[in-house]
Image: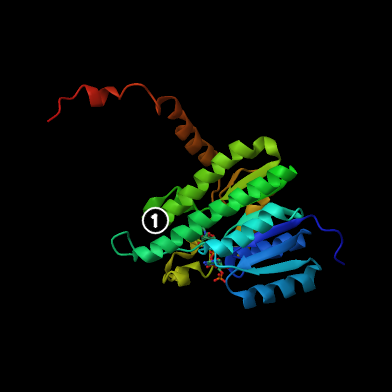
Amino acid sequence: MSGSSKGKVVVTGASAGIGAVYADRLAKRGYDLVLVARNEERLKELAARITAETGRKVEVVKADLTSKADTARVEAVLRNDPDVTGLVNNAGMGVQGTILEADVEKLDTMIQLNVTAPTRLASAAAAGFASRGNGTIINIASVLALAPELFNGVYSGTKAYVLNLTKSMQRELADKGVRVQAVLPGATRTEIWERAGIDVEEFPAEMVMGVDEMVDAALSGLDQGEPITVPPLPDMKDWDAYEGARLALQPNLSRQHAAERYRSKQAA
Ligand SMILES: NC(=O)c1ccc[n+]([C@@H]2O[C@H](COP(=O)([O-])OP(=O)(O)OC[C@H]3O[C@@H](n4cnc5c(N)ncnc54)[C@H](OP(=O)(O)O)[C@@H]3O)[C@@H](O)[C@H]2O)c1
């Protein structure tokens, strides 16, 4: 029943939501798994179900990715286990409130989870996969990377970071056999909203995607070779136009002299 494994994928934030669906889909595609989150009981339940349904081997790692020591244990797996060929860099959280309202300690924890941990894990995966000449890293960003107006600035900032990091990694790792995809989900029906004290059911239904549909679309984007996948975006030409406008700035972003408008005005 189990057949030979296609490799092993580390999925962070696998105990719920997007990560749990990735785990299910990747096992059905023939991958063994390493599931990472804090809630060990939920991870073990998911692992048992996946193994029963697919015959795949599923390891469970209880880790708080805001802890450097716990994150280091996951980094070691990515660097050193020769069977690991994939990372779904997914664990994340939101914090409600503007920068004036939100508890800065919660914002700090979010930055640890949404920025520091995925950076450390991406670094370990890049090193391990490049040395083995093979691997795929999926970084879960958000459409808020493109639309800070829609939510508070610190969460959006963490996701813009993930998008920028992914683009840089794509350039740096292209010739080393390592593929990197950024996934930018729109609002997706998971626990993340409730955990942040927000009722996602108050959003217009047409703005919220089901989690199965979101992950299946993201994996379809991966299969189609997309470097950036935006599941809700109807026409990728709109993304290409956005990227085109951004790239058109490049020749003028670093110059010997300030722009004329700053030089011609007298200081007040
Ligand atoms: N849902 C959306 O609308 C949406 C939209 C765009 C992007 N995203 C992104 O998608 C990713 C997954 O979110 P989701 O919606 O699936 O959220 P979710 O349902 O709340 O699941 C979050 C996962 O991360 C884990 N996690 C939380 N804190 C952790 C910590 N300190 N250490 C280790 N694991 C931790 C949780 O497990 P434990 O509690 O067991 O640790 C859980 O498995 C996040 O990066 C999020 O920013 C979500």
* Residue 98 x, y percent position in the rendering: 32, 60
* Residue 228 x, y percent position in the rendering: 58, 45
* Residue 26 x, y percent position in the rendering: 72, 60
- Residue furthest toward the left? 268
19 relative to 239 in the view: left or right:
right
Q: Residue at x 50, y 55 (%)?
A: 116
Q: Residue at x 35, y 63 (%)?
A: 104
Q: Residue at x 46, y 48 (%)?
A: 160
- Dividing the picture into quadrants, the one containing residue 39 is bottom right
Q: Residue at x 25, y 25 (%)?
A: 261
Q: Amino acid at mark 1?
A: Val
Relative to 80, is 24 above or below? below
Relative to 165, is 75 above or below? below
Dividing the image into 4 quarters, which one contains the N terminus? bottom right
Q: Which residue is mark 1?
A: 154
Query: What number of labels is visible?
Result: 1
Dividing the image into 4 quarters, which one contains the C terminus? top left
Name the quadrant where ligand 1 sits.
bottom right
Q: From the viewer's side, name the closer residue of 138 and 77.
A: 77
Answer few, some or many: residues within 10 Å of disc 1's Cα (few below 14, many 20 plus, some between 14 and 19).
Answer: many
Helix, strand or loop for disc 1:
helix
* Residue 195 x, y percent position in the rendering: 47, 71
129 relative to 260 in the view: left or right:
right
